[in-house]
Amino acid sequence: MSEALRRRMVEDQLVRAGISDRRVLDAMGRVPREAFVPDALAASAYADSPLSIGGGQTISQPAIVALMLEAARVAPGDRVLDVGTGSGYAAAMAADMGATVHSIERDPDLAEAARARLKALGYDVAVTIGDGTLGLAEAAPFDAILVAAAAPAIPDSLRRQLAIGGRLVIPVGRTRQRQELRRITRRSAMEFDDVLLELVAFVPLIGREGWPDASGGG
């Protein structure tokens, strides 16, 4: 039954939303989304909407997860940083696509639950508890960085941790009423391209003083 629901999600939600990267579509058809939501919401796991995972955090709707992975051009062998582990779904997707994945989560309870869930499902993801706005310098540089919460501005620390040619996909905005999903591509040590992908609504990114939380949209 879950396989049928995943196929329907891919065909009815993702393809219709314009997702065309075959690696993303295949991974979305394999990763069991119901394992990343609370048991009470398992029947709604493949709905075209975000779902609560507790603590005021959400798992993003499937089309947004797919859009971010496609925009980041995640490929086998890439080093990926997932900021805001949340349930671990986005990290599992990147791992399923063949990437080496590090994930960082500010909420210790979410981090521990995601670490156990990912291990039980066989996804090799290194989950770290920490401030996602600072990235993970000890594991940098990254070919792709995915941020699952909205920052008021793009953190310089994340820009610096991109490899040359690396892609940072991040929602930017001070209110949920106006957030822009952006892709930052590092062209050289000092040159970056910045592209607007679409308007979105994410939970806020907390880290540095005055910033809201890096936990939870994944």
Image: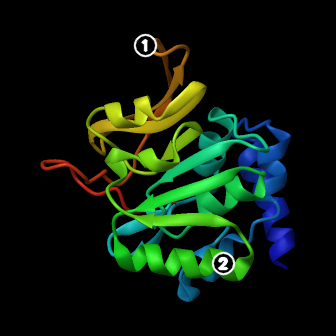
Front residue of 10/187: it is 187
Q: Is residue 58 visible?
A: yes
Q: Residue 28 placed where, x, y %?
A: 76, 57
Q: How many numbered tags mark residues here?
A: 2
Check disc 2 and give the amino acid type.
Answer: Lys
Identify which residue is drawn at 30% across, 36% down: 173
Q: Residue 194 placed where, x, y %?
A: 47, 18
Q: Is residue 60 left or right of residue 21?
A: left
Identify which residue is drawn at 77% across, 51% down: 97
Helix, strand or loop status at disc 1: loop
Q: Residue furthest front?
A: 138
- Which mark is drawn over residue 11? none
Helix, strand or loop status at disc 2: helix
Q: Is residue 174 above or below residue 47?
A: above
Check disc 1 and give the amino acid type.
Answer: Met
- Mark 2 = which residue? 119
Q: Residue furthest left?
A: 210
Q: Earlier in the sequence, mark 2 or mark 1?
A: 2
- Mark 1 = which residue? 190
Q: Is residue 217 visible?
A: no
